[in-house]
Image (cartoon, rainbow, N blue to C red):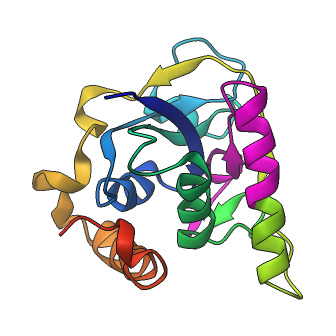
């Protein structure tokens, strides 16, 4: 089985992680930090907004099951890419909407995904940035698999994640795990 990776940032990494854990063909989702100037950042430092990093996820997927354009379209379709440096109550550059392509082909796909979103949403404009290359820093262990563990009782996540999952199931039903 071939595997590819994509790195995306669209607000709280737990909320984005929950969406992609539900996608057929996605084998792993890792929360982390990317796009900043401080090596080995911590959650506390990133949340301060002073490191330049975004909370992001690294999605490992089988391109024979779910394509990179589909991954990017699901990303664009399950958060609000028209909000600058925020997603709902999460405010700051660490919550920006961004794609971090790993090569020129991914960069072209990211540009195409943003264009598709803009075409499908007259009157709105995605502020999603295409950034990188940049070093990836995995989040601390206690942040990994958050939605699947005991942490899912967090009231913030319980308020934010279900609407994202509903968007995924409505718009990308054929790609949702049963």
Front one among 104 and 130: 104
| Residue that appears at 55% across and 21% down | 136
Left or right, residue 147 beside residue 167:
left
Front one among 63 and 5: 63
Which quadrant of the structure image shows residue 113?
A: bottom right
How many numbered marks, from 0 up?
Answer: 0
- Residue 123 image position (x, y, % from top left): 89, 88
Which quadrant of the structure image shows residue 170?
A: bottom left
Left or right, residue 47 beside residue 132:
left
| Residue that appears at 51% across and 14% down | 40
- Residue 169 image position (x, y, % from top left): 37, 79
Magenta span covers which residues?
88-113
Which image quarter holds the N terminus? top left
| Residue that appears at 23% across and 43% down | 145
Left or right, residue 5 beside residue 144:
right
Task: Return the residue found at the far left.
Answer: 150
Front one among 168 and 137: 168
Reply yes or no: does residue 106 show up in magenta. yes
Residue 9 vertical position relative to residue 3 in the rendered view, above or below: below
């Amino acid at each position: 089985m071939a595997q590819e990776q994509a790195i995306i940032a669209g607000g709280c990494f737990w909320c984005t992680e929950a969406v992609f854990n539900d996608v057929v063909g996605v084998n792993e989702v890792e929360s982390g930090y990317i796009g900043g100037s401080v090596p080995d950042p911590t959650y506390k430092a990133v949340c301060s907004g002073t490191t330049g990093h975004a909370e992001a996820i690294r999605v490992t997927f089988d391109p024979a099951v779910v394509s990179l354009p589909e991954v990017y379209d699901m990303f664009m379709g399950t958060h609000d890419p028209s909000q600058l440096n925020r997603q709902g109550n999460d405010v700051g550059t660490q919550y920006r909407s961004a794609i971090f392509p790993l090569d020129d082909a991914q960069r072209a796909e990211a540009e195409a995904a943003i264009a598709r979103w803009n075409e499908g949403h007259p009157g709105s404009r995605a502020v999603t940035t295409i950034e990188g290359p940049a070093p990836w820093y995995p989040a601390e262990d206690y942040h990994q698999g958050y939605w699947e563990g005991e942490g899912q009782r967090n009231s913030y996540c319980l308020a934010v994640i279900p609407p994202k999952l509903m968007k995924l199931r409505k718009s990308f039903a054929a790609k949702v795990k049963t």
